[in-house]
Structure formats: C-alpha cells, structure tokens
Image (cartoon, helix red, strand yellow):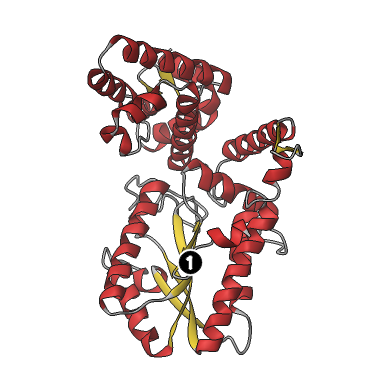
Amino acid sequence: TFRKKIFDKFELLSSCLAKEYLEFARQQSYVEANRRLSERSNQLQIEDLNLTKSDEDLKQFARHQSLKCLHIKSTSVEHIAHQACLKHAQSYQLDLPKRFNDDASYCLNRLVDQLWWSRSIRKLRNRKLSEIERDIGIVSKFKSAYSSKRSTQQRRVNKLKQRSFLENTHIQNHTGEKFSLAELSDKSTSNPEIRRAELMTRISGFEKVATVSEHSCYFHTLTTPSRMHRSLSKTNRRNPKFDGTTPREAQNYLRMVWARIRAALARSKISPYGFRISEPHHDGTPHWHFMLFIPKSKANEMNSIMRKYALAEDGDETGAKKFRFKAIEIDMDKGSAAGYIAKYISKSIDGKHIDEDLLGSPANEAAERIEAWSRDHSLRQFQQIGGAPVTVWREL
C-alpha cells in the first residue's frame, strides 16, 4: 500500500523509482528501500506542487499561484506584499534573481504573472526530474547517455510546440511587411546552422589573429573530482565516492575553478583568448574544453597555473593527474585549430558533419541528448574568452 500510493502519485517516474527500490531491497534491506522511496517522494513533492504532473496541470498550478500573489499585492501595502509573495515563491525552491530581494515593484510584477510562474515551475521540474533520474542511474552510456529518454522526448515535444507557435504567429513592421516568427527565428542563432557557423567564424577569426601574431594554440580539458561523478564508466555501477553532486553543482565547481585561474592569470599579466565548451560525460557530469591562444613565451606559465587550480581539490586521488587536466598543443602548421574543435561544437549543437560521438552513438542523437541535458540543468554550453563582443557581428 505504501509503495503503490507513491508509484501512482508519481506515475511519470514510477518505473525508475521501482527499479531503484528493488536494487536497495536486494543490496541492503526493504527498510532501506522504503526509506529511499520516501526520500524520492519528498523530492518530487514540494509543498502542494507535484513535479511529475502534466504540462496542463502545471499551467493551472501556475495560474493559481499568480492569482494568490495578485490578491496579496492588491490587499497589502507594497513592502508587506513584497515579503509575503517573495516568501511564497521561495517555498517552492524556485530560482529567483537577486533583484527580487532589492526591487519590490519588479518582484511583484513578476510574481503576479502566470507566464513567469509557468516558466519557473517548468524549469524546476525539468531540473529536478533529470537530477533524480541521474541519481538513480538511468543516465549513462549503458542506458541513455547524457540525459534520460524521458528528458530527450520531452525536449523533442517542446521544440515541436515552439515551432508550431512560431509558424502561426505573425508580426508586421512599420513598412507593412509581414513575417512569421519562425522566419525571423531561422535568421538568428536559434537556428542551429547559424549558431554553429557563427561559432566557427569566431574561432577562425581568433586563429587568424594568432597566426599573424605567432601565438601558440592549446586545447585543454578540465573535469571535476571523482566524488561528483555518479556512475563508473566501465561498469555503470554507482561510484562509491559519489556524494550526490548534481550537474549544476558540478558546473558551479568548474566555474569557481576557472574564476581562480582567471584571477591568477591576471596577476601574472597573462591574457589568453579563445573559447570554452561545456559538455557532459556519459552520466551527465559536466566537463569543460578550452581552445586557447597565447603568446609562446607565456604558454608554459599558463598551463602550470591551470593545472595547479584544476588539482587543488582532491588532486592526489587515483587518476587525478592523468584525467583532471589535460593540455595539448595544436600544431597549426599541420592542421587548423578551428577544425580541431569543430567536432566538439557540432556534437553540442546538431551533430552535422560528424558520424558518431565518442560513445559510438549517431552524432545527431547525441547532440539531441546533449541539448536536453544543457536545457534541463540550465548550463551555458559556449563562452568566448577575450576578444571583441559578438553583438555587432549579429546586428550586421
């Protein structure tokens, strides 16, 4: 009765919850299995919000919350309404901008908006479900690499809905010209072809600058300590060191390491330029790749600084020196630096011009799962380092 009540309540994840329950029962005891199932129930139910409900149910929930905040706003003075509505939103563990704390008017205008609630709840739902699926162990190269089948399918459905909306919504400019939003979207970086072409153009531009300046080019890989990896790559068994770190927390760890590296480079008056790409290991744990250009005289010092901070935490654990940080010099006389990084960019966007990823999956399927992974956990995939802003290029 206890199990059935939870499985029926969270039907969307019932099969993977049952899988985890049986594993706990076999490996430990039914008491521990019941305890873990109860923990999952608490993760999937936040106050009166069931994260496994349908999109339509979540829209109705969002509407109810916006009306509740509207009632508070209309019956209280601003500063009291601000605190009450803010506390209400925080009770659902939503990601709230810092501005919500400081700007009462801005905060209230958002919290009485049904669309804001709907977007925020949907983002929370996608992230929480993906974290639980990864923690259970169904995100791996043995099951579904990078993101779960549910997540990938949900992303596919969402894209179809978005496309339908764009195609059926039209706008007209001051000269009387009329366009569908789909036409305009296809001319922006929302179009994977344009996004990939823009990134390759920017990298190619950096490479031309480096060639003229006689700078060196390095390809770096930066990854997280083993405690942040959920599954062992060879067996798919649960990593005994895994401490429950989520992909988003692992991404924040890498951001912190990179911030320290940047500060140390600035102190040494070293200014590399290039790109950073974030992509997942098979179990959804992020790692970063860098393509950095640097004056030859500064290259060794830059690599030493990066290695120092990459290994600052748990740097003496087995395999750390081999896997946590790698630096490969690219010989631009033998091949293009842009060509070297092209496969990483394509794999993270749409898989065009490559056949398979490193796990042997079709590149287009891998790209679809990687996109779902980045959207679910709200992770920035590409970042330019140094150089001019891209805004002018996009406007032109």
Q: Which of 268 and 311 is in front in this view?
A: 268
Residue 357 visible in the shown view: no
Residue bearing the label numbered 1 = 289
Residue type, label 1: His
x and y, in percent, of residue 178 in the image? 76, 37
Q: Nearer the viewer, residue 40 or 189?
A: 189
Q: Quadrant of the C terminus?
A: bottom right
> Dot 1: few (<14), some (14–19), or many (≥20) neighbours within 10 Å?
many
Quadrant in the picture for residue 124: top left
Q: Image height check: is 201 above or below 186?
A: below
x and y, in percent, of residue 77 in the image? 25, 15
> Residue drawn at (44%, 19%), measured in percent from left and top?
6
In the picture as drawn, the residue positioned furthest to the front comes out as 175
Q: Which of 392 and 8 is in front in this view?
A: 392
Q: Is mark 1 on a helix, strand or loop?
A: strand
> Residue drawn at (37%, 79%), measured in percent from left and top?
303
x and y, in percent, of residue 164 in the image? 72, 32
Q: Image height check: is 232 above or below 100?
A: below
Q: Quadrant of the N terminus?
A: top left
